[in-house]
Image: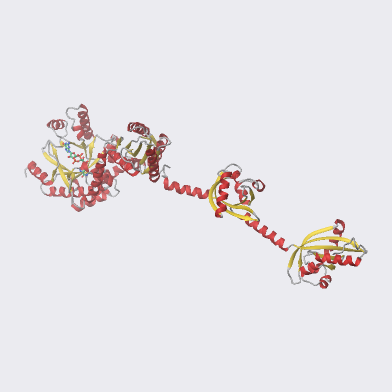
Amino acid sequence: MPRSFDKFPDDHEYNRELLAFAVNAVHDGVYLIDANGCFVYVNQAACRALGYSRETLESMGISDIDPDFPMAEWPDYWQKMRTEGTLSFESRHKTHGGLFLNVEINASSFDFGGHEYCLALSRDITQRKAVEKERAVLGQAVNNVHEGIYLIDSDARILYVNQEACRALGYAHEELQGMTIPDLDPEFSFDRWYHHWQKTAEAGQCKLQTTHRRKDGSRFPVEISATHFSYMGQEYHLSIARDISERKAHEERIKRLAYYDSLTGLPNRALVIDRLRHALAHAERHEQLLAVLFLDLDRFKHVNDALGHGAGDQLLVQVGRRLTQFLRQADTVGRLGGDEFLVLLTSPNSAEDVVHVVGRLHNMLSAPYELAEHQFNLTVSIGISLFPRDAVDAETLIKYADNALYIAKDTGRNSFHFFNPAMDQQMHERIQLEHDLRSALENDEFLLYYQPQYDLNKNIVTGAEALIRWQHPTRGLLLPGQFITIAEDTGLICQMGEWVLRTACSQARFWHENGYPDLLVSVNLSSRQLSLPDFTARVKAILAETGCNPARIEMEITESSVMAQPETAIAQLAALQELGLNLAMDDFGTGYSSLGYLKRFPLNRLKIDRGFISGIPDDGNDVVITQTIILMARQLGLSVVAEGVETEAQKTFLLENDCANVQGFLMGRPEVVETFNQHLQAAFGN
Ligand SMILES: Nc1nc2c(ncn2[C@@H]2O[C@H](COP(=O)(O)O[C@H]3[C@@H](O)[C@H](n4cnc5c(=O)[nH]c(N)nc54)O[C@@H]3COP(=O)(O)O)[C@@H](O)[C@H]2O)c(=O)[nH]1
């Protein structure tokens, strides 16, 4: 049974012992210090903490255990203690073993027996300091992270945020702490939060992309890495939010590059096909029609050639803009490449409805364009295929629209055509022909036919036009009209043209050396040949190779082939004339040559188109035009030849109008060289 003060109030000895016991039972160090800073009494906790025996420690003073303490200021401390009663501060105590302990000192002074003392309680706070330091370092580290860090409870309340989160969202620390996730994430309702909490709790962590809203209302995309954890019975989320605006913008740029045409900003082929597939699925579900329009700008190459690629690009941009403005939201327009556009018309009521839209679209695209400070008129050709009438899949619909476009182009451009099954057969044949054409040269399948040209005054053969034929292995003899366009489109015309020139030059030399020294052999030139930069050099080489006198060769060019780039053509033609060749303007009167240019083209003769000759003598217009061309040729110092002469009346008219040079079925059709030779012998009598 313990004794109490009440029971033994006068038992001083006992009380002293009890006090000493109590002081020694205290966990903090107790130091009784005199006015000089020397220890008068220390308890066991002090001895234990510093590793000294009581005798040793009681022989020491403050400066022995606290190397940081400013002993010179001890009197001031003493005075302060006296006036304020207590003094609290933190310091370090050095143990006997040389270690340092962080201590918190609470000291009070008092008088006893005429002497002043100080009782100091020293609490070891080394561990607390270590924790505080750890926290400070951690806090510093968390604030140096370049991602927003959020500590969130199950009610979506934000308990802690780092500086980056405050910076990114534009809130002060105090504002953010206490807000909830739905306050700053417009994509998160509380319901969604609870679902997310649950999911993360089950998996331990979770990643997601969402949007954060700044204080000013602006938004930015973030990637969240959330970790679920428990601490002292409470559950939390630690969410790390990374701003992915730049990554998103980069992804967007890559997407644009992959799915959009960089010039016009329109969807590219890949995206258009994708949209077409979706539109088809929709049309199928709702039993609707869908029209695929394949558009191609007529003679776009001429724009590029005449006005330069910059103007060509501008034109494509303007066309794209007009199409976008014209179409409804549900429709799609994309650029497939070059001057080709694809339009998807969703849910038209009928084919007539499509015709109506295409008519308006045609008119809208035909309005003049402003290009390089010039007004420019453009026409387009359009091929159309319909779902489900023609096909049900995207690729076939596009192919059929392309086939129909080809027909629209072939029948004079500036028009539109619907696909029909016969067209598919036609396209197959064309593809096959294109394939065969590639090997025709190697297989020596081309022939030159020669059609005589006459001087009606002298009644002699003055020349021959060399006209190509293709002896196809299965289709028989093909006329130029059946393959020249394919050769032009594929570029094979250049090789073919060289073969024609080489063959015609060899033949001209043969005739020259075998009794017909003055015979002029004409060859047709394609515009693609003329635009070859080394064309003159190639011609020169062929002349040298065949030993042909250039004066015996005439090159026929058309108005359209030289008018695309008149200045270049003038230089090119001058170089050919320089070689000694003759130059004729073929199909004259059908094109758009200005008289100004005609004067500057280095020509030797004009060839009146057979379209005018066919109307003679009954069609008044053809009569006047033919007379005008003959007169104009005379005035420009050019000779003139009329082609397509089929009747005596035409022949008589031409003779009466001073045009004795003629070519036509009346005098002779194009023949193989052997037949032409017989013709020559009969005409010249040798
Ligand atoms: N680049 C090249 N083009 C060539 C070459 N060979 C021919 N061609 C081009 O094909 C066009 C058609 O040629 P073709 O079918 O041979 O027809 C020629 C004559 O047969 C035809 N002609 C001649 N006289 C008459 C006639 O009285 N009536 C009538 N209905 N047709 C007639 O005209 C064609 C020759 O015309 P042209 O060239 O304008 O003098 C041909 O027009 C060439 O463009 C080639 O090697 N390269």
Q: Which residue: 87% across, 56% down? A: 83
Q: Quadrant of the C terminus?
A: top left
395 vs 203, left or right, is left
Residue 372 in sight = no
Q: Quadrant of the N terminus?
A: bottom right
Q: Residue 603's x, y, as percent?
A: 24, 40
Q: Residue 560's x, y, as percent?
A: 28, 39
Residue 440 in sight = yes
Q: In what quadrant does ligand 1 lie?
A: top left
402 vs 669, left or right, is right
Which of the 4 image quarters holds residue 43?
Answer: bottom right
Residue 377 position (above or below residue 32): above
Q: Residue 91's x, y, as percent?
A: 77, 63
Which of the 4 image quarters holds residue 556?
Answer: top left
184 vs 606, left or right, is right
Marker count (numbered)? 0
Front residue (pair 263, 331): 331
Q: Which residue: 62% across, 55% down? A: 230
230 vs 28, left or right, is left
Q: Residue 404's x, y, as percent?
A: 29, 39
Q: Which residue: 57% across, 46% down? A: 193
Front residue (pair 231, 35): 231
Q: By what rule are the colours in the image chosen?
A: secondary structure
- List the single residue furthest toward the left: 685
Front residue (pair 407, 329): 329
